[in-house]
Image (cartoon, rainbow, N blue to C red):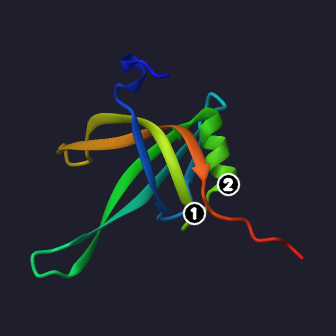
């Protein structure tokens, strides 16, 4: 059973990768993986029509989780990701402050069914 402190800043998404993870090998020997995951929500609008909305989520993984992402994920993979929200900001090349929200990955579950090889 989880206590409340374990549930603070916890995010879980089910979606599809927009592209293969972008992998960077860091100077300290660790890996970093960046990816975008699309989640879809379908609802009925005021006219009674079904509408599907897609939300894109920026996801980042470090170390062992990045290594796993590099090995098993590809464009279109259906995944369950679990992690925490990270908010950061930076100044772009023109000095304009940009704000970014990302999911820092703790766990990945690949939902794609593997085809049997013959």
Mark 1 residue element: loop
Q: Which residue is mark 2?
A: 72
Mark 2 residue element: helix
Q: Nearer the viewer, residue 86 or 49?
A: 49
Q: Nearer the viewer, residue 84 or 48?
A: 48
Q: Position of residue 47 (x, y in %)?
A: 11, 82
Is residue 54 found left or right of 3 in the rendered image?
left
Q: Position of residue 36 (x, y in %)?
A: 43, 56
Is residue 4 found left or right of 49 in the rendered image?
right
Q: Position of residue 99 (x, y in %)?
A: 23, 42
Q: Residues within 10 Å of mark 1 (few under 14, many from 20)?
A: some
Label number found at residue 46: none
Q: Residues within 10 Å of mark 2 (few under 14, many from 20)?
A: few
Mark 2 vs mark 1, CA separation in Å? 9 Å
Quadrant in the rendering for residue 44 = bottom left
Q: Residue furthest left?
A: 46
Residue at image location 27% in from the left, 38% down from the top: 90
The first of marks 2 and 1 along the sequence is 2
Which quadrant: the C terminus? bottom right
Vertical placement of 89 versus 48: above or below? above
Vertical placement of 65 versus 6: above or below? below
Residue at image location 26% in from the left, 48% down from the top: 93
Q: Which residue is mark 1?
A: 77
Asked if labels 1 and 2 touch by Cβ distance under 8 angstroms, the answer is: yes
Q: Residue furthest right?
A: 118
Q: Position of residue 81 (x, y in %)?
A: 50, 46
Residue at image location 24% in from the left, 76% down from the top: 51
Q: How many marks?
A: 2
Residue at image location 65% in from the left, 35% down from the top: 64
């Amino acid at each position: 059973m989880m206590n409340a402190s374990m549930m603070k800043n916890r995010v879980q998404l089910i979606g599809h990768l927009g592209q293969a993870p972008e992998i960077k090998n860091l100077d300290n020997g660790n890996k970093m993986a960046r990816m975008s995951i699309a989640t879809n929500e379908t609802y009925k609008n005021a006219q009674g029509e079904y509408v599907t909305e897609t939300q894109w989520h920026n996801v980042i993984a470090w170390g062992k989780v990045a290594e796993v992402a590099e090995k098993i994920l590809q464009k279109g993979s259906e995944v369950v990701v679990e992690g925490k929200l990270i908010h950061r900001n930076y100044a772009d090349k023109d000095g304009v402050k940009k704000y970014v929200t990302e999911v820092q990955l703790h766990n990945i579950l690949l939902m794609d069914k593997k085809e049997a090889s013959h």
